[in-house]
Image (cartoon, rainbow, N blue to C red):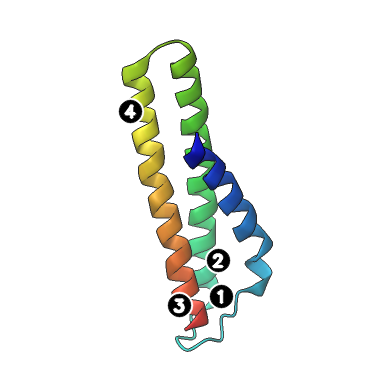
Amino acid sequence: MALRAALLATRHCVLLNLDKIDTKGQHEVKQTTVTALLDAYNRLQEIIFDLYAEYEKAMQNEFYADASLLEARAERLFEEAESIIVVIQEQTNG
């Protein structure tokens, strides 16, 4: 549950700061690349949210093996989404 709260908080922070991304940094990443990465990040966030919703249903129904699998996949995708943000920051802020 703590990871889900972190997910929502992180997504909110990223969405608030999208307009502050400088694509003229040291590496001069094209805006289309940043946009593609942000789109991937946002799609991953939607998938993660769906996985956590199913995780909660599985827990309520005491399907613990299913819940464990859903949670593990959500956590893995969450880590990947976070790494996308790191890449964007590294490429746009030097």
User: What kind of element bears circle 2?
Assistant: helix
Whether tag 1 and tag 2 are in contact, CB under 8 A, the answer is yes
- Mark 4–mark 3 Cα distance, whole angstroms, equals 33 Å
Foreground label between 2 and 4: 4
Query: Where does the image place residue 18, in percent across and percent down from the top left?
Result: 64, 66
Q: Residue at x 50, y 55 (%)?
A: 41
Q: Residue at x 49, y 31 (%)?
A: 52
Sequence-earlier tag: 2 or 4 = 2
Mark toward the start of the polypeptide (1 vs 4) = 1
Depth order, front residue of 41/6: 6
- Whole-number angstrom distance, CA of label 3 to CA of label 1: 11 Å
Mark 3 or mark 1, which has the lower sequence index? 1
Q: Secondary structure at mark 3?
A: helix
Q: Which residue is mark 2?
A: 35
The spot of residue 38 in percent (x, y) is 53, 61
Please report contact status of discs 2 and 4: CB closer than 8 Å, yes or no.
no
Mark 4, residue position = 69
Mark 4: which amino acid?
A: Leu
Q: Write down the residue under mark 1.
A: 31
Type of amino acid at the residue the image marks with label 1: Gln
The residue pinned by badge 3 equals: 91
Instruction: Report the amino acid beneath label 2.
Output: Thr
The residue depicted at 56 percent of the width and 75 percent of the height is: 31
Towards the viewer: 93 or 3: 3
- Report the disc number at residue 92: none
